[in-house]
Image (cartoon, rainbow, N blue to C red):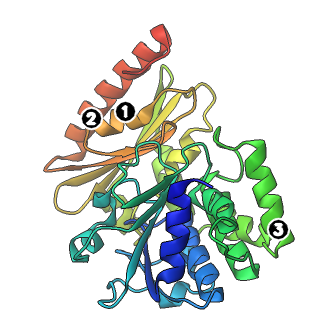
Amino acid sequence: MKAELRKARRWLHAAEHICVVSHTSPDGDAVGSMLGLTWALRAAGKRVSPVLPDDVPATFAFLPGSAEVTQEAPADADLLVALDTADIERLGSLGRQLDRPIDINIDHHVSNSRFGSINLVASDTAATAEHLVELLQPFSLALDEQVANCLLTGLVTDSLGFRTDSTGSATLATAQKLMQHGGRLHEIYERTLHRRSFEAIKLWGQALGTARCEDGLAWTQVTLEGKAEIGYTANGDADVVSQLTAIEGAEVAVVFVERPDAEVKISWRAVSGLDVAAIAQHFGGGGHRAAAGANMHGTTLAQAERMVLRRTRAALQQYRQNGSGR
Ligand SMILES: [Mn+2]
């Protein structure tokens, strides 16, 4: 066993009160990994506090423990574990609350900045949850039904239902293992990937109705006015960007989400293999090769759109010529 793994196991078992954290705008992998580790550690007799900088989205309220997630880090935790968090800024307000560094950083983002005292980063896994399943045995933690359902949620959502190119045969073997331990694939898939609020579907209608697709690049906008008209109150784009990737001929999809205070959130999805994380980084964001995001401040929707589309088009051109978007 690697020295880092041994050390992590030692720290986990020596700790009495462990605080587990994850990133802002938490997704299924953030919530699932965090709660999965919470239950595995509790089964080993630990006191565990799950903390997120934002509310748990209603979609994941069915996960055991979601109701006890708080936004305030406990003062008396003796170990801090971050999950699915590529860099310390992704912890948002929580990062500023913590008075000491993260002890154990468990993640799968290629861009992980290794901000922990111990860094367990497996960029070849489809989800942090998948990596966690591999870590349970070296950590001497058990995989029970609660753990299995939390981790299967992370795996199903981050792999978009086993269809990202990061989904390997090992991902499916992990899913099978989680099902054998009580993971309810059908329920998780239905709740997290298929079902949407009526407002979200109407938002799709609005955003898809004004979508453009030119020369392999598909894009659209979600405006504050449009959201208000529909009564869509959640943050984000209701995953409109993934709908754009379904367009025949689209190689890259971009969605611009207008936010209050002259902020625009941009989401990219690559279909062809273009590295959109590199484009997002240019605008102060990051992510994975095939899925990335950024927040631009002090800009109008039109300005952001002009700058981002120009850069994305150029990267796509470059990628077609030499297989690299840089
Ligand atoms: Mn993830």
User: Does the image show residue 202?
Assistant: yes
Residue type for callout 1: Ala
Would you say the residues marked 3 and 2 are in contact, meaning their CB atoms lie under 8 Å apart?
no
Query: In terms of sequence position, does the residue under pointer 3 or pointer 1 come before the other?
Result: 3
For the residues labelled 2 and 1, the Cα–Cα distance comes to 7 Å
Residue at 37% of width from left, 86% of height from top?
77
SS for tag 2? helix
Q: Is mark 2 within 8 Å of ligand 1?
A: no
Which residue sits furthest left?
A: 298
**Around disc 1, counting alpha carbons within 10 Å, would you say few (fewer than 14), some (14 to 19), or many (20 or more)?**
many
Helix, strand or loop for disc 1:
helix
The image position of residue 266, as x and y in percent, is 35, 46
Residue at the top extreme of this rendering: 321
Which mark is drawn over residue 35?
none
Where does label 1 land, which residue? 278
Are the two marked residues, 2 and 1, in contact with CB atoms closer than 8 angstroms? yes
Give residue 176's position: percent from left, percent from top: 83, 60
Q: Is residue 238 left or right of residue 226?
A: right
62 w.r.t. 317: above or below? below
Q: Mark 3 highlights which residue? A: 179
Q: CA distance from mark 3 to mark 2?
A: 40 Å
144 lies above or below 282: below
C-alpha distance separating marks 3 and 1: 36 Å
- Position of the N terminus by quadrant: bottom right
Instruction: Give the labeled residue for mark 2.
Output: 282
Q: Residue at x 22, y 63 (%)?
A: 260
Coordinates of residue 78 in the picture (x, y in percent): 37, 84
Residue at (67% x, 75% y) in the render: 141
In contact (CB < 8 Å): disc 3 and disc 1: no
